[in-house]
Image: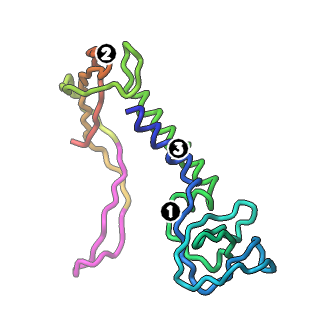
Amino acid sequence: MRKIWVFLLFIVMNSHLSAEKLKISQDANLRSEPNKNSKSIKVLLGGTICEGELFQDNNDWYKVIVDGDVGFVHKSLINTPFSLGSFTKKHPLLMRIAFIIFLIIIIKMGRNSKCPRCNKWFAEIKLSKNLIDSEGHYSTIDRTDIKRNSQGEKIGTIERKEQVHMTTDIYRQNCKCRFCGYKYSYKTRETYEG
């Protein structure tokens, strides 16, 4: 399991390193430098497929490779299909935030399934769940009723508070560690109206 997460982390972190497939949207000059005044290497016809990536020093230009020639094409002349690499380059802060959220979720999942004996994460195998006790209580909830006219058309809503009977079931969750085989249990609660 750990190898899979490391592999996924490697892919996400290095997705910006690969060149992407690009399509020239209309006839364009392949230029020697990333500016409109530089020498034209050759003219690329609209519809030409090439490989390239957004030039890091000037985000208005793509550095592309066409038939062995390396040059620059303005981004307004290129159609880019969505790829993780191009999205990462265009939105690096958003990708970092998404990656941090992803890591927090993984860490929380791992810690929540930690074995109490060997302390290894992602260790929990659920074996059985047994009902121990059931408790009843009342709770106040908000309800929204729909008012209708004689034709059945909605004419408004009414907000009201209602006391309802709630039931909380207490379960014993029996588990086993996938690494050391230790068997353990803990209590869980499920609350529902009824």
Kindly give the residue lying farthest to the right in the view shown.
37
Circle 2: residue type: Cys
Q: Which residue is mark 1?
A: 83
Locate residue 133, reporting x and y percent.
Answer: 21, 24
Q: Quadrant of residue 76?
A: bottom right
Q: Which residues are magenta?
A: 140-158
State how many labels appear. Answer: 3
Q: Which residue is mark 3?
A: 101
For image coordinates 79% across by 77% down, the residue present is 38
Locate residue 163, reporting x and y percent.
Answer: 30, 44
The overriding secondary structure of the stretch rendered in magenta is strand
Camera-near label (2 vs 3) is 2
Camera-near label (3 vs 1) is 1
Asked if residue 26 lies left or right of residue 166, the reply is right
For image coordinates 50% across by 70% down, the residue present is 81
Regarding mark 1 in the picture, which secondary structure is present there? loop
Regarding mark 3 in the picture, which secondary structure is present there? helix
Circle 1: residue type: Ser
Locate residue 156, reporting x and y percent.
Answer: 36, 72
Camera-near label (2 vs 1) is 1
- How far separated are the C-alphas under marks 2 and 1? 42 Å
* First-in-chain label (2 vs 1): 1
Pick the quarter of the image with the N terminus.
top left
- How far separated are the C-alphas under marks 3 and 1? 20 Å
Classify 46 as above or below 57. Answer: below
Q: Dot 1, how many residues are within 10 Å of its Cα: few (below 14), some (14-19), or many (20+)?
A: few
